[in-house]
Amino acid sequence: MDLRNPSTIRRNGVFEAYFRRTSDASASIARALEITPDDPALIALAADIYQSEGNLAGAEQMLARLPAQLPPERVAETCSRMRQLIYQHRNEAVISSLEPIVATPPLSIGTRLSEYHILLAMAKRLAGYAAAARDTYETGRDFLLAAIANSGQTQGRVHAMLGQMYAGLGQKELALREAAIAIELEGEDKVLGPAANEALARIEMQLGEKDAALARVPQLLAAHYHSWFYFVPITPALLRLDPTWEPLRGDPRFQKLANAQP
């Protein structure tokens, strides 16, 4: 193993992030960026970690190093930038960035296009465009259903994303069914199993099942995993930043979790 290779260092940083060793992860990424300072994947991962720490200023500085116009295929990097905008309440910027991609997506994005659907629908809802958000959820649902039918897709991530589309449309039974499929597919995986449970908690929040979602948060905060939304494990800071959790902000039980020291 070549510890001077930026790809190797990045993999180390990813696993350190999964295991919540954020200081070690940040140090690994910084070393890799000294070798390849313009690597978009490294830059986005560094921004993800800053976001997980509640350091939006640090994340902003890092994201500023990305090209102004990212290719749509750079899904992880684009999503990092879009989450930052949502955390900054700049929902119109998310809409203007993602609407053209979703309207005419490159085929090479594959099912990861659904990550854009979810962020776009979220931004529209937060901006007060409820009908437009519903349209985006419908588009995302139809896209994923077609992808599953055409490829026999059985990844937990895909079913979790489909569950979020159904939840956005208020279709509770279908949303929970897809979440259950995701958990069945990934539940035994130590990295992806918690991701499936996090997706279920997000779906429950969308459906107004606040107590059920809240009951999952302590385990998620202790888990070592790759989040399909945040790309790093959920943290108290992300509970405070992500508007998904807004309905719980007045609950003392949630406040205790969101204000805990990581």
Image (cartoon, rainbow, N blue to C red):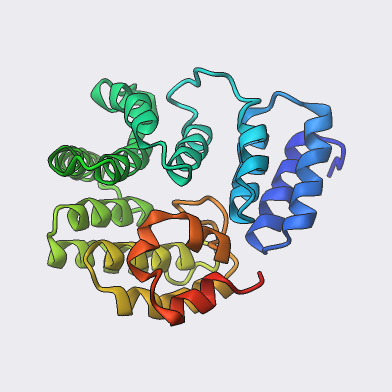
Regarding residue 65, the answer to whether it shows in the image is yes
Relative placement, left or right, of 66 versus 171 is: right
Q: Is residue 162 above or below residue 33?
A: below
The vertical placement of 262 against 129, above or below, is below
Q: As drawn, is 42 to the left or to the right of 189?
A: right
Q: Position of residue 93 (x, y in %)?
A: 39, 29
Q: Position of residue 120 (x, y in %)?
A: 31, 38
- In the image, what residue occupies the spot 61% across and 32% down? 63
Decide if residue 149 is in sight here.
no
* Residue toward you, 252 or 136: 252
Q: Quadrant of residue 5?
A: top right
Count of marks overlaid on the render: 0
Q: Residue furthest front?
A: 250
Q: Residue 59 appears in which quarter of the rendering?
A: top right
Which quadrant of the rendered structure holds the C terminus?
bottom right
Q: Quadrant of residue 225?
A: bottom right
Residue 25 lies, in percent from the top left, at 74, 52
Name the quarter where the N terminus is drawn. Answer: top right
Name the side, left or right, on which 172 lies relative to 201.
Answer: left
Q: In the image, what residue occupies the spot 87% across and 37% down?
A: 4
Q: Nearer the viewer, residue 235 or 187?
A: 235
Name the residue: 34% across, 35% down.
113
In this orientation, which residue lies closer to the viewer: 87 or 211? 87
> Which residue is rendered at x = 20% and y = 58% of the image?
167
Q: Looking at the picture, how far across and down is residue 20, in whole percent?
A: 67, 63
Q: Nearer the viewer, residue 196 or 254?
A: 254
Query: Relative to residue 99, is residue 40 drawn left or right?
Result: right
